[in-house]
Image (cartoon, rainbow, N blue to C red):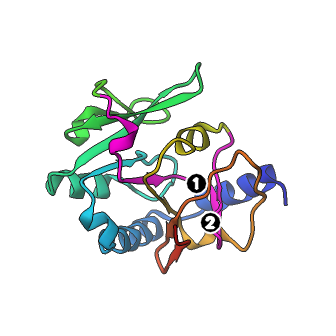
Amino acid sequence: MTKTEIRRRILSQLKQITDNQYNQMTEKIFENFVSLPEYRKCWTLMTYVSFDREPDTIQIINDALGKAKTVCVPYVEWEKGSMFPVQIFSIDDIDFSTKVPQPLNQSLVDISEIELIIVPGVAFDTSCNRLGRGKGFYDRFLSGCDALKIGLAFDMQILDEIPFSSGDVPVDMVITETRILSVHK
């Protein structure tokens, strides 16, 4: 299958998840994530703000803020094709009125301070390769980031293999509701 065909198939499957299924699976992903020693040890993390049936990150954001961690979310400059980590201090610092939620402030954080980054993906494979939405924002950002890269996904988003090209940046770990896939750094 091509990247486009995979995106189409997975996004269609995600729309079929009931609210109850979504909540149950997301809760298990959250539990798996917060159990990670890498999460417990880190003090500065970046995460996407979930939308459109992506695994929920609001619980993770609230948990991290409650533990006095520095939390960054991406600010996207659509026209320039770039993304920047912006620190938030509460969920109220996020504008949910846009298609892709954005931070309201511009408290930039140096990319070198980020220890762990939670990365969205439409699909991942068992080797932790990632297929995003096709715009390349995360691949460009991740190519200059040394942080531990963790993808969140539902089991239905894990394939044996996905097409991978030279500009694609894999993640180090993928967490689903039933397992943790890891590629050792």
Say which residue appears at 78% left-offset and 52% top-offset: 3
Give the crowd class for mark 1: few <14, some 14-19, many >=20 residues within 10 Å: many
- Secondary structure under the numbered disc 2 in the rendered image: helix
Give the crowd class for mark 2: few <14, some 14-19, many >=20 residues within 10 Å: many
Q: Marks 1 and 2, how far apart in space? A: 8 Å
The image quadrant that residue 30 belongs to is bottom left
* Circles 1 and 2: CB atoms closer than 8 Å: yes
Q: List the residue tagged with mark 1.
A: 121
Amino acid under disc 2: Gln
Q: Is 148 above or below relative to 52?
A: below
Asked if the magenta segment contains residue 112, the reply would be yes
100 and 63: which is toward the camera: 63
Residue 158 in the image: state x and y as whole percent.
63, 70
The answer to whether 4 appears left or right of 47 in the picture is: right
Q: What residue range appears in magenta? A: 108-134
Amino acid under disc 1: Gly
Residue 36 in the image: state x and y as whole percent.
33, 72
Residue 106 in the image: state x and y as whole percent.
31, 24
Q: Is 102 above or below relative to 57?
A: above
Say which residue appears at 46% left-offset and 59% top-offset: 55
Say which residue appears at 28% left-offset and 36% top-offset: 87
The answer to whether 73 appears left or right of 178 in the picture is: left
Q: List the residue tagged with mark 2.
A: 157
- Secondary structure under the numbered disc 1 in the rendered image: loop
Q: Is 103 above or below relative to 168?
A: above
The answer to whether 35 appears left or right of 65 in the picture is: right
Say which residue appears at 52% left-offset and 41% top-offset: 144
